[in-house]
Image: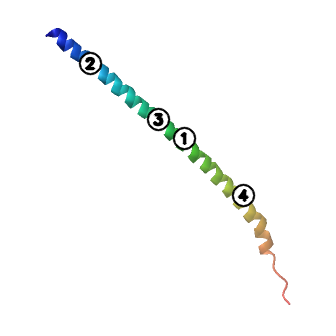
Amino acid sequence: MIQLLLKLLVKLAAALEAAAAKEQKKCEAALAAAAAKVSQANAHRSATRQARQVASALKDVVAPASEVPTPQQ
C-alpha cells in the first residue's frame, strides 16, 4: 500500500516538474517578446525625439524668413 502511494507521488512529482518546465518555457518566450517590444518602443521614442529636433531646427530656420516684412508697392 505504501509502495503504491509512493509510486503515485513520484508520478505526481514528475507531472508537476513537466508542467513547471512547460510554464517556464512559456514565460521565457513571453519575456523575450516583451523585451523585443521594449526595444522597438525605445527605437520609436528615439526616432520621435530626433524628428522633433529636426522639426524645431527647421522651424528656427524658416521663422526668420517669414518675419521679414515684404516691400509695399
Residue drawn 74% across the image and 60% down it: 57
Q: CA distance from mark 1 to mark 3?
A: 11 Å
User: Which of labels 4 and 1 is toward the front?
Assistant: 1
Q: CA distance from mark 3 to mark 4?
A: 38 Å
Q: Is tag 1's residue or tag 3's residue first in the polypeptide sequence?
A: 3
In percent of width and height, residue 8 lies at 22, 17
User: Which of labels 1 and 2 is toward the front?
Assistant: 2
Mark 1: give few (<14), some (14-19) or many (20+) Cα within 10 Å.
few
User: Which of labels 3 and 4 is toward the front?
Assistant: 3
SS state under label 3: helix
Residue drawn 47% across the image and 35% down it: 29
Q: Amino acid at mark 4?
A: Val
Identify whether 6 is placed above or below 48. above
* Marker disc for residue 36: 1
In percent of width and height, residue 62 lies at 77, 68
User: Which of labels 2 and 4 is toward the front?
Assistant: 2
Q: Amino acid at mark 2?
A: Lys
* Marker disc for residue 54: 4
Identify whether 14 is placed above or below 71. above
Q: Is tag 3's residue or tag 2's residue first in the polypeptide sequence?
A: 2
**Residue behind mark 2:** 11
